[in-house]
């Protein structure tokens, strides 16, 4: 907030507007203030001056627009127009990090599962989300520090435990929580979220997630799509037994995978093209072609196995194999360049075998050992050599590992380049339909990427585990608002046949505006007021709103009076 003194006691007040009205509008459409009031348990004593529902909505606005630690939020809110944050003018001074922490404690004591259900049901109705196809994936939220004072793992109910596990940020030295999210295929809108203990494996979350989704959808007739961790007998059987439908990737560890690859190498199969699309990485590159065939054998459980061969993946597999072979030969050259040769046949063979195993090329390279005889003459007796010195001949053997390529094995491996299998119990899906539905799965990973980069979930500046769980629940709402905002803008663009909006720097066009781009083009906008000595408003005016921002506000159906646009 900026206040400047002018003649006659007149003051200029400048407050930031930014994208706060957009965020507030979506929070109201989510009915979140009322849902908080309804599901937060009553506090003992008199009603607080600043309700937790209001504090949590301010915190959500901060997470979406600024992402600052709790102690910095009051100063951030003081620079903003209070009504756009859901605050009255005299309530800004009541914000502090202690009140924010107690609001998170209040949310922790609430039945957040019921709150999530009520929120999602309202969102589906308000925004008319199609729930016929849902995609699930997990990621990890990484933590630094001890977090020693946690509730015992056997105690229930309790917050999830921050502990070591399989870290997807490639930081096994740090503790974590497992963050599971499920999105719709209609705009990648998050429909479900739950936080698990950091050492929970991905295959343990699917049954619980699917049961929750059944309660939201109201029936089991929807397609549940997930990665290979869904492909276990328990998970698939749980869904199939309830007449549900699933689609997942079959892992290489399954016996069905080995059987089909051997069948392909020995008998061949009649591939047919099922999909073709432009190359996403090289504009002038060849189209990516997908061929498919249904396996003549079903899975052990009786489910369909659909095999695909991607031209792009085939190129990647071939390049990866060549790189591994090159690394193996480079290590062989290093063994040959040793200043001292190997003393025995077994030592040389073990060195070569270690190289091919570590580079994972033992299927295509066979290790052999070459030997070389070397002769030298040594004196029979000690002393300085002379004309009568006698010598004896001594033989030495030198051993070196060599690699022999198995051309037949390499040829067979080439036949398997670009392969990947899907497994499903949905008898109605064609090869083309199943492929397209699974190709939507990266949008879940995109939500994870936004969570960690755009909205900056880590580092988590909290030490209380209960508050951490509440904060991560709010981050689900953050992702929800971002997804709904993107969906709304893009749907309106398609309806009005707008190919792009000039929301990028320098007015460059954007075909699919993201929440980050929408916030960025509005951030920095300010509202100015001239006040007299008693604080009465004399005049109000705003910074100029760019044309692209005005177009966005119109598409979102937002009241532009907040930005001084008539």
Image (cartoon, helix red, strand yellow):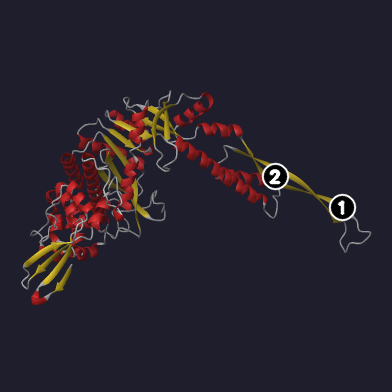
Tell me which corner region of the image, top left, top right, bottom left or bottom right, holds residue 233: top left
Q: Position of residue 79 (x, y in %)?
A: 19, 65
The residue where tag 2 is placed is 345
Q: Earlier in the sequence, mark 2 or mark 1?
A: 2
> Front-most of 55 and 519?
519
How many numbered marks does the figure carry?
2
Which residue appears at 50% of the width and 27% of the height?
A: 264
Could you say whether the residue bearing mark 1 is in a helix, strand or loop? Answer: strand
Disc assigned to residue 261: none
Q: Which disc, if any, is residue 392?
A: 1
- Residue 350 vertical placement versus 536 (above, below): above
Asked which quadrant contains residue 407, the reply is top right
In the rendered image, the vertical position of residue 33 relative to residue 544, given as above or below? above
Where is residue 424 shown, x and y percent of the image? 35, 30
Question: How far is disc 2 from disc 1 in space, using C-alphas?
Answer: 25 Å
In front of the other: 403 or 126? 126
- The residue lying at 49 percent from left, 35 percent from top is 417
Crowd class of label 1 (few under 14; some 14 to 19; many from 20; radius 10 Å):
few
Q: Residue furthest right?
A: 388
For the point 52% across and 23% down, which residue is it?
A: 267
x 13%, y 58%: residue: 564
Query: Could you tell me which quadrant the N terminus lies in?
Result: bottom left
């Amino acid at each position: 907030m900026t206040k400047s003194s002018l003649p006659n006691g007149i003051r200029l007040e400048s407050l930031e507007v930014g994208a706060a009205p957009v965020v507030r509008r979506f929070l109201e459409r989510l009915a979140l203030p009322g849902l908080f009031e309804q599901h937060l348990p009553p506090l003992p004593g008199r009603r607080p001056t600043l309700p937790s529902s209001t504090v949590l909505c301010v915190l959500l606005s901060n997470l979406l627009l600024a992402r600052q630690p709790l102690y910095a939020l009051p100063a951030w809110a003081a620079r903003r127009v209070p009504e756009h944050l859901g605050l009255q003018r005299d309530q800004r001074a009541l914000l502090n990090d202690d009140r924010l922490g107690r609001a998170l404690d209040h949310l922790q004591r609430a039945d957040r599962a019921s709150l999530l259900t009520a929120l999602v049901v309202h969102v589906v109705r308000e925004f008319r989300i199609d729930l016929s196809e849902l995609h699930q994936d997990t990621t990890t939220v990484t933590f630094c520090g001890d977090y020693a004072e946690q509730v015992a793992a056997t105690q229930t109910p309790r917050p999830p435990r921050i502990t070591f596990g399989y870290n997807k940020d490639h930081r096994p030295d740090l503790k974590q929580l497992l963050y599971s999210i499920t999105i719709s295929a209609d705009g990648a809108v998050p429909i479900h979220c739950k936080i698990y203990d950091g050492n929970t494996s991905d295959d343990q979350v699917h049954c619980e997630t699917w049961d929750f989704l059944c309660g939201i959808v109201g029936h089991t007739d929807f397609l549940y799509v997930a990665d290979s961790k869904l492909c276990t007998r328990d998970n698939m059987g749980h869904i199939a037994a309830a007449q549900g439908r699933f689609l997942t990737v079959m892992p290489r560890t399954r016996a069905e995978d080995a059987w089909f690859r051997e069948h392909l190498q020995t008998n061949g199969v009649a591939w047919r093209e099922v999909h073709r699309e432009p190359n996403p990485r090289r504009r002038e590159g060849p189209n990516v072609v997908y061929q498919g065939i249904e396996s003549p054998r079903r899975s052990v459980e009786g489910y369909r196995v659909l095999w695909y061969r991607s031209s792009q993946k085939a190129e990647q597999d071939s390049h990866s194999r060549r790189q591994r072979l090159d690394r193996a030969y480079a290590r062989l050259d290093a063994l040959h360049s040793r200043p001292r040769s190997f003393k025995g046949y077994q030592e040389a063979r073990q060195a070569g075998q270690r190289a091919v195993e570590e580079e994972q090329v033992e299927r295509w390279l066979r290790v052999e050992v070459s030997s070389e005889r070397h002769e030298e003459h040594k004196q029979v007796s000690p002393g300085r050599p002379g004309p009568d010195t006698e010598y004896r001949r001594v033989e030495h053997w030198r051993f070196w590992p060599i690699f022999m390529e198995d051309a037949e094995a390499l040829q067979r491996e080439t036949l398997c380049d670009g392969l990947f299998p899907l497994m499903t119990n949905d008898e109605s899906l064609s090869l083309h339909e199943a492929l397209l539905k699974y190709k939507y799965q990266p949008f879940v990973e995109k939500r994870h990427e936004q969570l960690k980069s755009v909205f900056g979930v880590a580092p988590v500046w909290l030490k209380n585990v209960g508050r951490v769980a509440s904060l991560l629940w709010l981050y689900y709402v953050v992702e929800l608002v971002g997804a709904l905002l993107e969906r709304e803008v893009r749907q309106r663009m398609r309806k009005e046949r707008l190919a792009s909006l000039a929301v990028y720097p320098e007015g460059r066009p954007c075909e699919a505006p993201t929440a980050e781009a929408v916030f960025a083009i509005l951030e920095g906008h300010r509202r100015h007021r001239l006040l007299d000595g008693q604080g009465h408003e004399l005049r109000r005016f705003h910074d100029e709103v760019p044309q692209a921002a005005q177009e966005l506000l119109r598409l979102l159906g937002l009241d532009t009076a907040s930005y001084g646009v008539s």
